[in-house]
Amino acid sequence: MAKMTIDGTEIEVEDGITVLQACEQAGVEIPRFCYHERLSIAGNCRMCLVEMERAPKPIASCSMPVGDGMVIKTNTETVKNARNGVMEFLLINHPLDCPICDQGGECDLQDQAMAYGFDHSRFKENKRSVTDKNLGPLVETHMTRCIHCTRCIRFSTEVAGVEVLGATGRGENMEVGTYVEQAISSELSANIIDLCPVGALTSKPYAFEARPWELTKTESVDVMDAVGSNIRVDSRGREVMRVLPMLNEDVNEEWISDKTRYACDGLARQRLDKPYMKVDGKLQAASWHDAFDAIGGKVRGLDGSKIGAIAGDMCDAEAMTALKDLMTALGSNNIDCRQDGAKLTAGARAGYTFNTTIAGIEDADACLIVGSNPRLEAPIINARLRKRMVEGGFKVGMVGEAVDLTYRYEHLGAGPQTLKEIADGTHSFCEILKSAERPMIIVGQGALTHADGVAVLAAARKIADTTGMIAEDWNGFNVLHTAAGRVAGLDLGLVPGEGGKDVAGILDGAASGDIEVVYLLAADEIDTAKLANAFVIYQGHHGDAGAHIADIVLPGAAYTEKEGTYVNTEGRVQRGRRATFPPGDAREDWAILRALSEVLGKTLPYNNLAQVRARMVEIAPLLDQLEVVTPSAWADFGQAGSLDGGPFASPITNFYMTDPISRASATMAACTEAFVETGEKTGTDG
Amino acid sequence: MTEQPATFAFDADNQALADKHIAKYPEGRQASAVLPLLDIAQRQCDGWLPRAAMDYIAEMLDMAPIRVYEVVSFYEMYHDTPRGKHELRVCTTTPCWLRGSADIVSACEDEMGCKVGETSPDGVFSLGEFECLGACVNAPVVWIDDDYYEDVDPDSARKLIQAFRKGERPEPGPMTDRQKSAPAGGPTTLTGAGE
C-alpha cells in the first residue's frame, strides 16, 4: 500500500496502480481521452496532466505509477493551464462539426471542452482534413474529427484480437486507419464506436437518426446469444433506435457483440402485428377472438398425446412457464425447448450450465474446447478467453473445426475419436489438463447436437472428473449455449415428459399423423417442412419459418417489448425490461398463453406478471436468484457410449443471422454480404 | 493507386543478410529486425516497398501487416510508391539554408524538371528536402542514394545531376577542393608541423 496526498487529502492506495486511478479512488475526476481502464496505457492525449510535488512539470497521471509519499495536486493554476493548453491543441485540427455530428450530446471532447477548455480559439490557420476510411457496414468514419487517442487501435489489437487498425504517417500527417482498405472483420468491431471519445467513429446504421437526449433509455438483457450481455435499449416512441452495452464485470464487461448491437433494426421489419388464420391455404388477418376460437375448435377434445409444443431459442422464462403449464393441463408430454436437438437433459444443472462462470475464465490455466467456435457462438466469452490468453500461462486445446479464434490454441482433432482419446487419458493434452491447477472444458452445441451427443457429454464429464476439473472451489465443466432461452427452458423442465416426444419426435409425429396439433412458441430453427400436415399454431414476433407453415399465427412480443426473465449459459438469472410496446395487436407471450388457456377451458392460475413469476419460481426455485450464479452440485449426467461419428461442426456458420430478429435486420444482411459471403476480408481491390 | 507487384521474395543474398539481422535478436523478438529488413527489401525493389514486400516481411517476422505499414509510413526513408533510380535529397535546415540550400533546391528542380517531392520525367531522380543531415560543417549538403555530397553550390549540384544521369557516380565528399571537413582553403593551424 502506498500513502499519498491528493488535493490535500491523504489516501492509502494499492501499489502498482496509476496516479489517475488513485485520484479516482479519492473521488477526484481527471479528464482523459486516451486512457481506458480495459486497454493498455498509451499516454498520448496528455489531457490527464496533474501536478506532482517535486516534479519540474506536470505529469501524465494515466501512466505514472503511484509511489509512497507522493503529493498530487489537481486543482492548481498550473493544472488548469495545462488542461487548457492540451485542449487548445486538440481543438486546433478538430472541426466545428458538433451540430451535424452524431456524437453531439454524448461526446467526451465536447463535454471536456466545456469543462476545461478556452471559450475561444486563437487558431487562424486552416484545419487539416483527412480522407474517411471504409471500415465496413457498421462503423462510419469521419477521420477529420480524430484526435489520435488510439483507443480503437488498442481495442482491435488487444481485446478483439484483429490487428488491422493502425496509425500510419507521422506528426500532422498521422492517420488512424487500416492502410490497405478493408472492413474490420471482428464480431466485436462496433465497440470502437463506444470507445471513440469524439465523433470520428460513429455508428453507420444509426447515422443521423436521433440525438441522445431524445431517447428513452431502458436497461435490459440481450437474447441474441446465451451470454446474457447487459444492454441499454435506446428507444424513441415505438421504435428501438439503438442498443448499447451496459457495464457488468461478471458478464460482458463493457463490450457487446455486433449482432447484439445491430440486429435491433430487425425489430421493425417482418413483424407479426395481428393474429392470422389460414383460410383456403392463405394466411389472412383475423381477430384474437376468431383465432382463439379456431384453436379451440381444433384442440378441444383432442387427446393430449396428439399435441406437441416446441419453445424457441429466444423465449423468456415466463412464456415457457405458461407453455409448460398449458401443455400439462392439456395432458400432453410432448414438449421440448431444444430446437437443435442438443442431447442435454433437464436433470443436473451442473450438466448444462457454464459452471466456471465467464469471469471465472480469468482464473483458469488450461482449457479444452469441444465442438464449439466461441468466436461465433459467444464473442463475449471468446474475448474473455483471449483476455486470459494475453495474460499468459493459459493453454487451449480444441477438438472440432480448426477456426480462427483470434488467439493461439492447439488443434487436437476434429471429432469424437480425439475426445475419446482424451477421455481415456491416452492423449498428450491430458497431461496439460492434469498439470493445470484450474483446468476447464467448454462443450459446445456442435458437440451436443452430434449424433453421439449423449456419449460426448459423458466423455466430457469423464474428462472433468479425471483431470481434476472438479474441486471444492472450482468447477471446470462448462456447456456453452447458443440460445438465450435454453437454460431457463431446461430449468423449467421443458423437455419431454414420461413417454413424451422431443423435437425430432414431434416433427416426425407431425409428418406421420401421430401429432395433430403443434404449438410453436417462437420456434423457427426447425425443419418446418415436416409440419405440413399438422395444425400448426405459431406464437412469435417475426414472420419467419415458423409463421410461414402456421395455420394460426398469434403475434407475440420481442425481447425489447416485454418484461422477461432470461437465464444465461452460466445459469445467471437476469431480467429484460420493456423498452417499447409490441406493435399492433401483439401481446406479451405469457399473457397470450393465459388467454388461450381460458378459451380451451384450462384456465392457467395466474392473472398478472407477479403471479406468473411466482409460478415460475415454484417450478424452478433458482429463477428467484437474480443477477447471480448459484453454484450447482456436481452430479451424474450423460451416458457413456460409442464415440465414432463424424467431426464436430459449429451450429453457427453465419454469425450475423441466427434468429428471426437478425434475419430480418438490414444491417445484419449487409454484414453477411461484407463478411460472410465474400470471405473474411473485403479484398485489396477496394 | 500504384500498380503493385503480386509477389515478393528476398533473393538468396538478401535472405542471408536478413537472417543475419534476425539472428541478432532473442527468440520472440524478431520484430525488432523490421527496420533493416525493410531497408534490404527496398534496395531489392528499386527504392520502394510494394505491399507484397511489406506483407512478406510481416509474415517473416510474425507481425501483423498493419504494424509494418505503420513503420513504413512513419519513416521518411521508406517509400510505398515507386521512386526514381536515384534518390536526391537536399538538406534545407538552418545551417544549410544559411549557406544557400534554397538556391540548390531551385537548381535541382530546374535541372531535373520536377518539383520537390516528385520524380523527374526521365525517371532518374526523385527529389526531396530533408531535415538536418548532421553534416553542417560542410553545409550545404546533398544526399544522393547512400552518399553525402558536401559544400555544394547550384553549379556543382547541376554537374552532379548531369553525371548521375550519364550513369557516372562522382566521388562523394566536398564538391570544392576542401579536404573533408578541414578548413576551406587549407589548414589554418599547425601549419608549421613537421618543419
Image (cartoon, coloured by chain):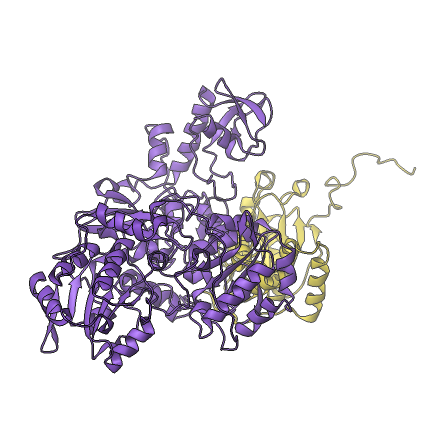
Chain colours: A purple, B yellow
Q: In this orientation, does residue B107 appear?
A: no
Q: Quadrant of the N terminus of chain A?
A: top right
Residue B173 at x, y percent in the picture: 71, 50
Answer left or right for B83 relative to A262. Answer: right
Which residue corresponds to the image point at 33% horizontal and 39% vertical from the top-left? A107
In-front residue for pair A141/A430: A430
Taking depth in this image into account, of A48 and A545 the one nearest to the observer is A545
Q: Residue at x 59, y 66 (%)?
A: B45
Residue A517 in the image: state x and y as whole percent. Answer: 20, 72
- Please determine whether, in this image, residue A198 is positioned above or below residue A164: above
Q: Is residue A608 left or right of residue A619?
A: left
Q: Residue A231 versus residue B134: which sits nearer the camera? A: A231
From the top left corner, tell me how far across and down residue B74 is, in percent. 54, 50
Residue B23, given in percent of the width and then of the height, sits at 72, 58
Q: Quadrant of the C terminus of chain A?
A: bottom left
User: At 66% from the left edge and 54% from the top edge, which residue is drawn?
Assistant: B29
Relative to A54, say whether A559 is above or below. below
Q: Is residue A85 positioned above or below A354 on the image?
A: above
Q: How many marks?
A: 0
Seen from this angle, which residue lies furthest bottom?
A512
Q: Can residue A8 be seen from the camera position used here?
A: yes
Write down the quadrant of residue A30 in the picture: top left
Q: Is residue A630 left or right of residue B186?
A: left
A495 horizontally vs B112: left or right: left
Q: Nearer the viewer, residue A287 or A269?
A: A287
Q: Is residue A35 above or below residue A320?
A: above
Residue reaching furthest right?
A: B195
